[in-house]
């Protein structure tokens, strides 16, 4: 789906004129018509209706028109936010002598926590930060073998003794230290049309019989296998849009840290979150080398993370979604 087609449809729904919409975007009327027809194919519904030489919106078209303002507004805000990262890349390429600190993160950190830390903001440090997404199984051996002191990791683990034990063994073998930062309770992401959306809280027993969409190759997803019947689990690619589509269309449920509630850009309007009981939480922490090998740059970032978390826990937009360790 081309995002610009949504802009064309929004303009058309406001003026109800193909020719005016075409003039606004310096297009031909045929081009606008083709864009609308393509949207109808993408969504699988009719958006416009021709009758008595007049064009109008179908109920589905009216629904799309209502939702587009918020969606495209959020899209513009995301583009604005990402502009800072683009500037950071430009600065990095024009300043080859700047030091680079590599931070390896697990998918859960990359998805939910990067916005919380906001470490790549232009001008925040006198060095550049590069985030690298990978699995815990890959992070620990890489840190053990690396001779580069300007690197560390931020990881996520389920708050179960099983996974704490696995992490302890990995750290002992690699002579690494794990420092927990905060814990975020687990919530269920569910379609607002599902009966589960009305529950005050969802237990493992409530989830039985429901299709559970879980992310592939993630520790959080693997841990859910201990709570969910094997026949109910549908493992999908680690892509948020795929999960969201499955929740809405297949009436499936999925799980995420409570941090997901802090960013409405994560969830479509038809997906809501429900607290869980009897499930684990998600703990986020740092994997670090011994202090003697830790560079001044890494120490600065660690101090920044702690200050940032203390601020967010009290008054930031993430307040109430996590508890400091």
Image (cartoon, rainbow, N blue to C red):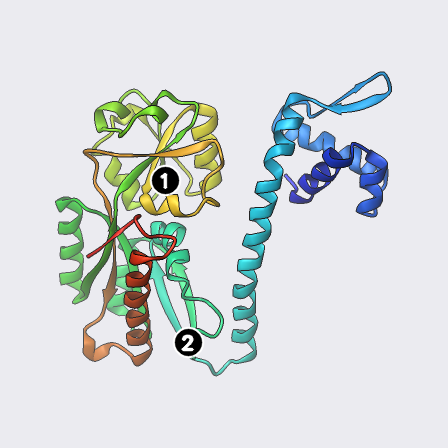
Which residue is more in the foreground, 268 or 35? 268
Decide: is 49 above or below 145.
above
Locate residue 113: give its quadrant.
bottom left
For label 1, the crowd category at 10 Å Cα-Cα, with few meaning under 14, some 14 to 19 and many 20 or more, is many
Decide: is 178 above or below 214.
below
Count of numbered labels shown in the rendering: 2
Tell me if 311 is positioned left or right of 251 in this view. Answer: left
Decide: is 155 above or below 52.
below
Tell me if 180 is positioned left or right of 57 in this view. Answer: left
Q: Where is residue 237 in the image (x, y as percent from the top left)?
A: 42, 40
For label 2, the crowd category at 10 Å Cα-Cα, with few meaning under 14, some 14 to 19 and many 20 or more, is some
Residue 215 numbered tag: 1
Q: Which residue lies furthest to the bottom in this view?
A: 97
User: CA gap, disc 1 to disc 2?
Assistant: 33 Å
Helix, strand or loop at label 1? It is strand
* Residue under label 2: 125
Which residue is more in the foreground, 141 or 222? 222
Quick one: quadrant of the C terminus? Answer: bottom left
Q: Position of residue 135 (x, y in %)?
A: 32, 53
Q: Residue at x 19, y 62 (%)?
A: 178
Q: Residue at x 43, y 36 (%)?
A: 243
Decide: is 131 above or below 245.
below
**Marked residue nearer the N-terminal end (1 or 2):** 2
The answer, for residue 149, to whether it is visible in the render is: no
Q: Where is residue 138 in the image (x, y as percent from the top left)?
A: 30, 57
Locate residue 71: give its quadrant.
top right
- Labels 1 and 2 touching (C-beta < 8 A): no
Q: Where is residue 180 in the image (x, y as percent from the top left)?
A: 21, 59
Quick one: quadrant of the N terminus? Answer: top right
């Amino acid at each position: 789906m081309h995002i610009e087609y949504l802009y064309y449809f929004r303009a058309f729904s406001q003026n109800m004129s193909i020719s005016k919409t075409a003039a606004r975007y310096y297009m031909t009327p045929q081009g606008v018509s083709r864009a609308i027809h393509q949207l109808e194919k993408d969504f699988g519904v009719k958006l416009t209706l021709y009758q008595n030489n007049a064009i109008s919106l179908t109920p589905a078209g009216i629904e799309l028109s209502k939702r587009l303002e918020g969606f495209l507004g959020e899209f513009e805000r995301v583009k604005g936010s990402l502009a800072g990262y683009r500037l950071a890349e430009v600065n990095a390429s024009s300043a080859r002598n700047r030091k680079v600190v590599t931070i390896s993160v697990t998918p859960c950190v990359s998805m939910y926590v990067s916005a919380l830390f906001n470490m790549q903001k232009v001008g925040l440090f006198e060095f550049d930060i590069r985030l690298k997404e990978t699995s815990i199984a890959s992070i620990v051996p890489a840190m053990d073998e690396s001779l580069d002191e300007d690197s560390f990791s931020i990881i996520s683990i389920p708050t179960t003794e099983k996974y704490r034990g696995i992490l302890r063994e990995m750290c002992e073998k690699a002579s690494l230290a794990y420092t927990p930062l905060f814990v975020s309770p687990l919530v269920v992401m569910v379609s607002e049309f599902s009966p589960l959306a009305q529950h005050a809280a969802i237990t493992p027993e409530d989830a039985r019989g429901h299709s559970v969409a879980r992310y592939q190759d993630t520790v959080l997803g693997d841990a859910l296998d201990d709570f969910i019947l094997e026949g109910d689990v549908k493992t999908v690619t680690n892509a948020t849009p795929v999960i969201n589509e499955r929740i809405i269309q297949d009436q499936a449920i999925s799980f995420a840290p409570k941090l997901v509630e802090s960013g409405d850009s994560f969830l479509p309007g038809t997906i809501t979150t429900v607290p869980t009981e009897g499930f684990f939480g998600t703990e986020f922490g740092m994997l670090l080398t011994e202090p003697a090998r830790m560079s001044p740059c890494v120490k600065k970032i660690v101090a920044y993370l702690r200050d940032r978390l203390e601020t967010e826990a009290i008054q930031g937009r993430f307040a109430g979604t996590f508890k400091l360790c």
